[in-house]
Image (spheres, grey):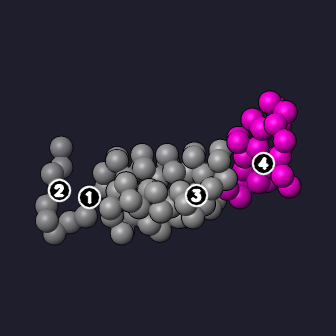
């Protein structure tokens, strides 16, 4: 296996996992800015903000195209709780 040296950049699977988790959570909950800030606080890496931000926005756009409302809106409607519009 190829070892990473200090002069080369290495792709780590953890970065893909963080970006994928943010995309899934962004598509389900339709949170954008809050989710990007939470993921930034978790990772502490400034270089991951742009991929996370891109993935969250694309997943929100796809989620909005497929159906309106987040999983929380659907749960409120299913339980019949009063909801302010």
| Mark 4 / mark 3, whichever is N-terminal | 3
| First in residue order: circle 4 vs circle 2 | 2
Q: Name the residue tied to disc 4.
A: 69
> Which stretch did the figure color magenta?
59-85
Location of residue 15 with respect to 77 vertically, above or below: below
Q: Regarding mark 3 in the picture, which secondary structure is present there?
A: helix
Closest to the observer, 73 or 26: 73
Report the Cα–Cα distance between label 4 and label 1. Answer: 38 Å
Q: Dominant secondary structure of the magenta stretch?
A: helix
Mark 4 or mark 2: which is in front? 4
Q: Mark 2 points at which residue?
A: 4
- Report which residue position mark 1 lands on: 10
Foreground of the two, 80 or 73: 80
Looking at this view, name the residue that lies furthest to the front.
82
Task: Specify whether residue 43 is painted magenta.
Answer: no
The structure residue drawn at horizontal position 56% and vertical position 51%, both measured from the top left corner, is: 23
- If the image is split into quadrants, where does the C terminus sit? bottom right
């Amino acid at each position: 296996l190829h070892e990473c040296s200090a002069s080369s950049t290495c792709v780590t699977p953890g970065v893909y996992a963080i970006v994928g988790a943010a995309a899934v959570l962004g598509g389900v909950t339709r949170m954008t800015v809050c989710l990007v800030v939470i993921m930034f606080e978790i990772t502490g890496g400034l270089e991951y903000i742009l991929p996370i931000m891109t993935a969250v926005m694309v997943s929100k756009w796809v989620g909005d195209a497929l159906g309106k409302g987040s999983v929380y809106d659907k749960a409120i409607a299913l339980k019949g709780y009063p909801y302010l519009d």
